[in-house]
C-alpha cells in the first residue's frame, strides 16, 4: 500500500500470548483504528488506509486467525488482542471504525475502556446479547449445506451470498476474491467472544462516545435490526443507510464511506 506523496506505511508484528498479530500504521494526528469483519482481513481497508492517513494516524491489523496474523489454534480472545494492540502501540485513545463482528468487538471494548475511545463508527455491526433469526443463519435459505474449507465458504459469501456484497458491485466482488486468495485463513466459525453479564445490548446507554452507525441498503434484515437496536441504545448516536451497498460498505462504496466517516470524525473532534 503506497500512500500519497510516496509515503510508505510501517508494518510489523505484535507478539501476544505466543502468537503474532500483523499490523500497519501510517500518518499522524488523532488515531483511527480499523477493525475488519469476519470474512475478509485488513486489506478490506485499502481505500480507507491511504485516505485517512492524509490527516490522521491510521492503524489496521489482522485479527488473530486472519490474513498475516497467527492461525489462532489455541485459546485466545479478540478483546485481549485489541487491548494488547493499544498497549504495545502506545495508543492513548482512538476512533474505532469497525465492521460486522468487529463492530461487536468495538462495542465491548468501548464499554470496558471508555477513556480510550474518542468515537465509534459501526459498519454493518452486530451487538452481543441481541438475537439472530433463522433467516440470518441460512442466509434467507441460500446458504449451501456444507463447504470443502474456509476459503470456499469465504468466496461463497463475497460472490454468491445475496447480502454480503450487493449484486451490482462486481468490482468489489472481484477485489474481495483476490484478497481471500492471497490470504485465505480465517476463523469465522470459531471466533471466541467472552460471554458478558449483563450482555452488551443492555449496556449500550453507558456509551458516551460519539457514534455513527452505517448499514448497507441491501444488507441482511438481521443486521438492520441490530443497527436499529444499537442506534436506540447509544445516546445521541446517528444512523445512516448507504445506498447500493450490502454488508461490506468500505469495499463497495469507498468514496461515500470515506466522506461519511471523515465528516463524522471532524465534527467529533471540533465538538
Image: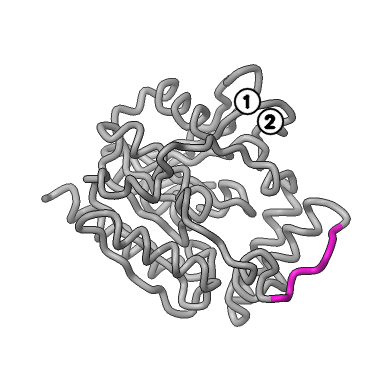
- Compared to residue 24, the image places residue 167 above or below, namely below
Q: Is residue 144 magenta?
A: yes
Report the residue marked by disc 1: 20
Name the image quarter holding residue 163.
bottom right
> Where does residue 21 sit, x and y in percent of width and height?
59, 30
- Compared to residue 197, the image places residue 98 above or below, namely below
Left or right: 208, with 187 as reference point? left
Q: Residues within 10 Å of mark 1 (few under 14, many from 20)?
A: many
> Where does residue 118 sit, x and y in percent of width and height?
26, 41
**Cβ atoms under marks 2 and 1 closer than 8 Å:** yes
Q: Is residue 269 magenta?
A: no
Left or right: 154, with 148 as reference point? left
Which residue lies most toward the right here? 148
Predominant secondary structure, magenta span: loop
Tell me the residue at 53%/66% (across/down).
Answer: 247
Q: Which mark is residue 70?
A: 2
Q: Secondary structure at mark 1?
A: strand
Tell me the residue at 40%/45% (across/down).
Answer: 200
- Distance, label 2 to label 1, CA atoms, is 5 Å
The magenta stretch spans which residues? 141-147
Amino acid at each position: 500500500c503506497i500512500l500519497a506523496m510516496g509515503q510508505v506505511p510501517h508494518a510489523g508484528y505484535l507478539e501476544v500470548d505466543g502468537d503474532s498479530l500483523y499490523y500497519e500504521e501510517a500518518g499522524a494526528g488523532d488515531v483511527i483504528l480499523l477493525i475488519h469483519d469476519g470474512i475478509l482481513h485488513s486489506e478490506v481497508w485499502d481505500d480507507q488506509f491511504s485516505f485517512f492517513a492524509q490527516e490522521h494516524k491510521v492503524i489496521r491489523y489482522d485479527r488473530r486467525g486472519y490474513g498475516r496474523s497467527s492461525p489462532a489454534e489455541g485459546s485466545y480472545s479478540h478483546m485481549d488482542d485489541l487491548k494488547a494492540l493499544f498497549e504495545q502501540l502506545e495508543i492513548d485513545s482512538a476512533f474505532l471504525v469497525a465492521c460486522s463482528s468487529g463492530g461487536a468487538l468495538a462495542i465491548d471494548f468501548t464499554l470496558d475502556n471508555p477513556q480510550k475511545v474518542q468515537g465509534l463508527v459501526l459498519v454493518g455491526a452486530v451487538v452481543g446479547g441481541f438475537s439472530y433469526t433463522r433467516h440470518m443463519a441460512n442466509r434467507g435459505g441460500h446458504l449451501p449445506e456444507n463447504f470443502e474449507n474456509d476459503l470456499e465458504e469465504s468466496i461463497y459469501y463475497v460472490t454468491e451470498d445475496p447480502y454480503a456484497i450487493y449484486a451490482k458491485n462486481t468490482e468489489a466482488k472481484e477485489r474481495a476474491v483476490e484478497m481471500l486468495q492471497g490470504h485465505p485463513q480465517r476463523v469465522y466459525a470459531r471466533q471466541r467472544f467472552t460471554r458478558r453479564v449483563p450482555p452488551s445490548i443492555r449496556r449500550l446507554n453507558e456509551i458516551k462516545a460519539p457514534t455513527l452507525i452505517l448499514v448497507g441498503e441491501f444488507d441482511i434484515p438481521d443486521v438492520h435490526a441490530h443497527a436499529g437496536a444499537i442506534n436506540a441504545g447509544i445516546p445521541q448516536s446517528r444512523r445512516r443507510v448507504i445506498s447500493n451497498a450490502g454488508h461490506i460498505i468500505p469495499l463497495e462504496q469507498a468514496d461515500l464511506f470515506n466522506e461519511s466517516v471523515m465528516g463524522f470524525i471532524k465534527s467529533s473532534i471540533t465538538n
